[in-house]
Amino acid sequence: MSIKTSNDALSTLEQNVRAALLQVIDPEVGENIVDLGLVYGIEVEGNIAKVNLTMTSPACPMGEMLLDDIHATLTRMLPSTMTFDIHLVWEPPWSPDMMSAEAKLRLGWD
């Protein structure tokens, strides 16, 4: 059963998903996945949070661990009624240009 929500509630839920993803740290880079530019989109429909994300490389050896961490963090930080639909995508390919200015500064890529 889907929960009907207003646009304001959806916006808040999307912000909550984003805030949770800010807690997920890429183990190779040591930076959160949002500021790294790995999160391509967040959409909440009813009680389902859809997240499109990528990795820094298709050959990322930590990919499964990172996906597990994402799911655990979302489960821990969001209402138990929410379910998560996490899609790993490769287009467009990630590049350092996708990082936030803050992440670049913290990593000395300025």
Image (cartoon, rainbow, N blue to C red):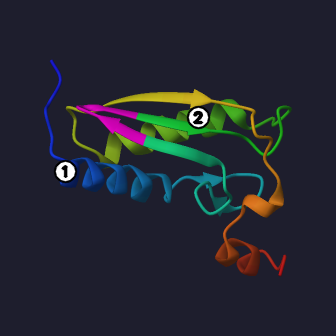
Per the rendering, the mark at residue 9 is: 1
Residue range of the region highlighted in magenta in the rendering: 43-49
Q: Residue at x 66, y 49 (%)?
A: 38
What amino acid type is highlighted by mark number 1? Ala
Q: Is residue 41 left or right of residue 13?
A: right
Assign a secondary structure to mark 1: helix
**Residue 95: % across, % down:** 82, 53
Name above or below for residue 33 compared with residue 108.
above
- Give yes or no for contact between labels 1 and 2 (Cβ–Cβ under 8 Å): no
Between residues 11 and 19, which one lies in front from this camera angle?
11
Which residue is painted at 59% across and 48% down in the image? 39
Quadrant of the drawing holding the N terminus? top left
Q: Residue 32: horizontal and vertical position, in percent?
A: 60, 60
* Image vertical order of residue 90 relative to residue 27, above or below: above
Count every numbered label the image shows and give the total: 2
Give the quadrant of the C terminus: bottom right
| Dot 2 amino acid type | Leu
Residue 52: numbered disc:
none
Query: Upstream in the sequence, badge 1 or badge 2?
Result: 1
Disc 1 to disc 2, C-alpha distance: 26 Å
Return the residue found at the far front: 7
Left or right: 85 as drawn, with respect to 64 = left
> Which residue is pictured at 60% across the width and 45% down the height?
40
Q: Quadrant of residue 108?
A: bottom right
The residue labelled by disc 2 is 67
User: Which of labels 1 and 2 is toward the front?
Assistant: 1
The image quadrant of residue 30 is: bottom right
Q: Secondary structure at mark 2?
A: helix
User: Residue 94: x percent and y percent?
Assistant: 78, 47
